Amino acid sequence: MSAVPAVKTDNPYIDFWNAVLVPKFNTWRHILAGGLQRHSEKVFPALPLRAGDRVLDVGCGWGDTAIELARRVGPAGSVVGLDCCNAFLEAGRADAKTAGLTNLTFVEADVQTHPFKPVYDFCFSRFGTQFFENPVSGLRNMRQALRPGGLMTMIVWRERADNPWLILSKEILLRYLPAVKEDAATCGPGPFSMTDTEVVTKQLQIAGYTDAQFERIDAEVFVGRDLDEAVAFQLAIGPAGEVYREAGKLAERRHDELVAALKAELKAFVRPEGVMMNSSSWMVTARNPG
Ligand SMILES: C[S@@+](CC[C@H](N)C(=O)[O-])C[C@H]1O[C@@H](n2cnc3c(N)ncnc32)[C@H](O)[C@@H]1O
């Protein structure tokens, strides 16, 4: 089983992001960034942004959506990208500098507790809110960052059955390895914690939002340039990566067998452009009534 990361904050999920997931995400950025973008690119054209708006991007990771938002609001507007991992933000700062953007800043903080002022016109999050230790606290704090009437849009994964890119490899590994123990160190509630529209609507209501709406987004995502890379990606990241990591020495001993089993199933997804699998998310919008 993987070691519990060294405690740096009072939030074990944030410690886990920093110690365990940042290095993995950085290794697999060339796959992850493109896949996540397939979802936001369907959302961005319709976002109700105006030149001059003030925008907050929550759980912004490497900051690619924050950079796009900064372009959209123009030099009269401004964007703050906030994340609990400074290593991600350093990449965002470098990319913003290369892009010549001066209306974008990055802040390292826990979204759930950061003392926001109600100054933002728009709050965005691409796959960030599913990892909050307390989703209602996080969503409420995001609402409190909005001016009265301000809008929040978050993208979250839909149900497992429609996300084979995240779940198929886990199911295969579980034929060989034990399920992850309840007390395993983790990054938070996880990618499928906001799939249920009734639960999320309730969370949004309790957090003080009105007008919750859900729109389904489907996209085929790239999971590797070839079968070898797709299998290595699945063993490192996401629900399959968690099963593999938590199985420790047993997984290492059975490595070749696991790789063969994954290859046998994933070969059905090989296309000329690489290994492509289906994914599905919700674009959720809600308003701060003020
Ligand atoms: C799946 S990644 C998505 C990153 C980015 N939005 C993207 O789409 O590329 C989730 C992000 O949420 C951040 N995160 C998780 N919990 C957080 C919290 N409580 N406060 C701030 N950021 C958080 C993580 O550090 C990570 O960058």
Image (cartoon, rainbow, N blue to C red):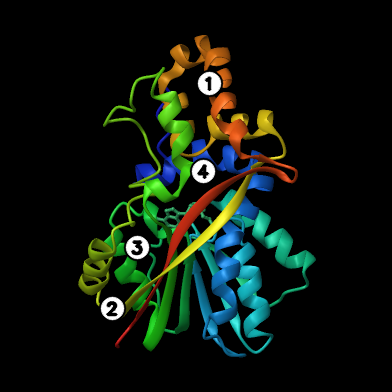
CB contact under 8 Å: marks 4 and 2: no
Label 3: which residue?
113
CB contact under 8 Å: marks 1 and 4: no
Q: Position of residue 59 (x, y in %)?
A: 48, 60
Amino acid type at image mark 1: Ala
At x 64%, y 81%, the residue is: 72
* First along the sequence among labels 3 and 1: 3
At x 50%, y 36%, the residue is: 20
Labelled disc at residue 165: 4
* First along the sequence among labels 4 and 3: 3
Spot the residue most to the top: 253
Spot the residue most to the front: 268
CB contact under 8 Å: marks 4 and 3: no
* First along the sequence among labels 4 and 2: 4
Q: Is residue 202 left or right of residue 149?
A: left
| Whole-number angstrom distance, CA of label 1 to CA of label 4 | 16 Å
Mark 2 crowd level (few <14, some 14–19, many ≥20, 10 Å Cα)? many
* First along the sequence among labels 2 and 1: 2
Secondary structure beneath dot 1 equals helix
Secondary structure beneath dot 4 equals helix
From the viewer's perspective, is the residue at label 3 or at label 2 nearer? 2
Q: Nearer the viewer, residue 82 or 239?
A: 239
Label 1: which residue?
261
Secondary structure beneath dot 3 equals loop
Label 2: which residue?
209
Labelled disc at residue 19: none
Amino acid type at image mark 3: Thr
Mark 3 crowd level (few <14, some 14–19, many ≥20, 10 Å Cα)? few
* First along the sequence among labels 1 and 4: 4
| Whole-number angstrom distance, CA of label 4 to CA of label 3 | 32 Å
Q: How many marks?
A: 4
From the viewer's perspective, is the residue at label 4 or at label 2 nearer? 4
